[in-house]
Amino acid sequence: MQTDRLSYIFRARADGEPIQLYFGARIHHRPRYPNLERAEPRKSTPTRPSGEQPELMRCEYASPGRGDYRHPAYQIGQADGSRITGFGYRGYRLLDGKQRLAGLPSTFDDSGDDAQTLVIELYDDLAKASLELSYAVFPHQDVIVRSALFRDDGDADLTIHAAASLQLDLPRADLDLIDLSGAWSRENRLTRARLRPGSQTIDSLRGASSHQHNPFIVLAEPGAGEDSGNVIGCNLIYSGNFRDRIEVDHYGVTRLTTGINPEGFSWLLEPGQQFQTPEAVLCAGDRGLDGLSRSLGEFYRRHLVNPRFAERPRPVLVNNWEATYFDFDADRLLGIARRARQLGIELFVLDDGWFGHRDDATSSLGDWVADPRKFPDGIGALAKAIHSLGLQFGMWFEPEMASLDSDLYRAHPDWLLGAPGRRLTPQRDQFVLDTGREDVVDHLFDAMSRVIRQTGLDYVKWDMNRSLTETWSAALPPERQPEAAHRCILGVYRLYERLTHAFPEVLFESCASGGGRFDLGMMYYAPQAWVSDDTDAVERMLTQYGTSLGYPQSMMGAHVSDVPNHETGRITPLRTRGDVAVFGDLGYELDVTALDDDQAGEISRQIAWYKAHRELMQFGDLHRLVSPFENDHNTMSWQVVSPDRRHSVVGWYQILNRPNPGHERVRLRGLDPDRQYLVREAGLDAGGGQAGRGDEDSSLALYGDELMNAGLFVPQVFDVFDPEHRSADFASRLFTVDTPDERN
């Protein structure tokens, strides 16, 4: 298999099991690769009659119990209790394009982007089982998408105990593991550490991809940085329990597997049935982390995200949550909407508390009917009034949850996940619906559809505020209970699929108490996601910077909220909060009716400037320039560049101001070295143009090579403190970098 820059080579060994020969920078095609196939025998390890030693092989999809003592890619239980299998090569299919998977979010090639799909057919004669390994090659983004399909071809049941989506054996161990870890309100913090002998695991058992660990990881050669070095990125298109295992063996081989977490999981295959794993995305290159991120961003836009929204500019929104929490009625919401329209906001989002009799978090989840006390004229009347203002209208749902104090629970107590006789464990006073059940999905589809039609809804914020506990389904027999967690996420996908098909013009945003399900499985249906419940500008710098390693900025909902911040208590300048949020899908989460004139003016300028640069900020190539996770962790900088390299915006941020600092130069990237650019500090004037923060004549005409090699000088002395909090801490600067003949 070849992409524009990569080669992936494997063959079948004597017993038909596929072994890997090479994955890396593109090399010439040859009928055979005798140099890559050479291996020296070793003592004290099992040897098959063919002379092959499984422990020394770099396997394509390793089988258990046959001399390879590393963790296998899969395990299948058979009628006699054995989990020993031996799938051998039987044939292949080569298909043009890439088709979507049924029932799972998956990649596609709708645009004729030269994708091809290779399916390797394997068979186990004793188990009477088929295994198909699928490789979809997207040559122009240097991406290979892998998955596995198991089928029971016999007359006895089989049980899948583990089934990875991808396995990759690499002939080196001197690699760094980069991952995105954290917790609720501080998601996706970038960590980097050298691999060590043994196994290292990034995983979740929470029923969701989780705040704690993101499915995206990178293996990087030592010294690989943003703009150079060999890196391999891997991401799973799945939103439930997952596991990335990186195992370094005693021969210096690194084995990567990713897929559904096998802990607590199994799947019963009856004769004639099949099981499809989620897809895993594999991308690699020698252009460092910057090149990897941009390849993945382009790939997601072209081959994963709903094409209807993949490149559609996202509206600027206001969400009423931090302005009102549960204390609102229709009149108060309309007041917020009217003020938002004056500021230039385009979408009003009604958050939690509009349904049932929900005045706090203890009731009404599952009862998706508007509260008549808050909306005496009905929710449709509010929607009509919002639309009449020229605003789009959005609403919050948490369809996967129920309150014990709800009509839904009183009518269907068996719809909750929960083991018989065991006390349920609440979180946020809510409990989890068994979305693996068709009747639950049908009910939720009908309830949500009714509201969407009543309101002519433009946007849905789909929340999921807790992890799974007591994962037992009343609809499954005992032998199928280990399927419950996976069936729940499949049910969520079915609900998303039905709603996005029935209402194709509605923009869905995924949320899971912030970034608890920020993954590609969700992005397939909801092209943007709420990155974190923590909207503090300093914390968001870290979270959005880390997230950008594996996801483009168009996927990141980024809001400006009030101060003191509701999570950290920190007071940051309104300008800085805006300068962070513009590197994403801009929104506001504060009471716009309580703004003074200066604050309202600043927000109006932010919105006008953002609209003038929206497509660049959401869909331009993002370059990370200064990491807040390195050096003294006090500064950060990033940059977006238009595809034609004529326009760019640079953001620079400092956390704490320091006396008598050294001079700061930031080396830009992605510009044309032979083109001259006009560099100005963006002042965000009311018309959406660019006014300097200070001198109007402070612009500089500089060539791209100077900006990239010598760097842009960034002033660090703030002579005028921000009047809002009288401090130069948490300061920011935005610069526009444009060709002189195309200035706004």
Image (cartoon, rainbow, N blue to C red):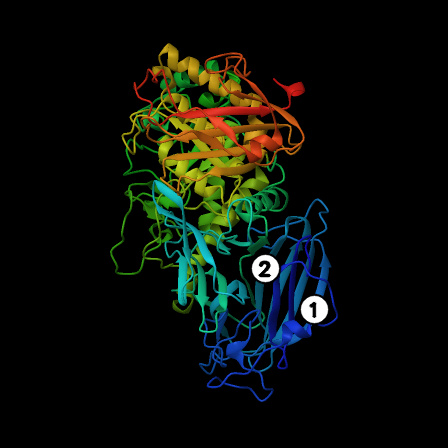
Dot 2 crowding, Cα within 10 Å, few <14, some 14–19, many 20+: many
Q: Answer with mark 1 or mark 2, whichever residue precedes in sequence.
A: 1
**Mark 1 and mark 2: span between their CA atoms?**
15 Å
Q: Quadrant of the N terminus?
A: bottom right
In the image: residue 563, left or right of residue 732: left
Are the residues at dot 1 and dot 2 in contact (C-beta closer than 8 Å)? Answer: no
Dot 1 crowding, Cα within 10 Å, few <14, some 14–19, many 20+: some
In the image: residue 670, left or right of residue 388: right
Q: Amino acid at mark 2?
A: Arg
Outermost residue on the bottom side: it is: 49
Instruction: Please tell me whether mark 1 sits on a helix, a strand or a loop.
Output: strand
**Residue that numbered label 1 is attached to:** 92
Residue 391 image offset from top left, x and y in percent: 51, 20
- Is residue 77 at all visible to an observer of this figure? yes
**Residue that numbered label 2 is attached to:** 146
Question: Can you tell which quarter of the image residue 204 is in?
Answer: bottom left
Which of the pair 440/609 is nearer the observer?
609
Q: Amino acid at mark 1?
A: Tyr
Residue 552 image offset from top left, x and y in percent: 53, 40
- Is residue 318 at all visible to an observer of this figure? no
Outermost residue on the top side: it is: 597
Residue 98 image offset from top left, x and y in percent: 67, 53
Instruction: Please tell me whether mark 2 sits on a helix, a strand or a loop.
Output: strand
The residue lying at 33 percent from left, 38 percent from top is 364
**Where 239 falls versus 608 (above or below)?**
below
Which of the pair 198/318 is nearer the observer?
198
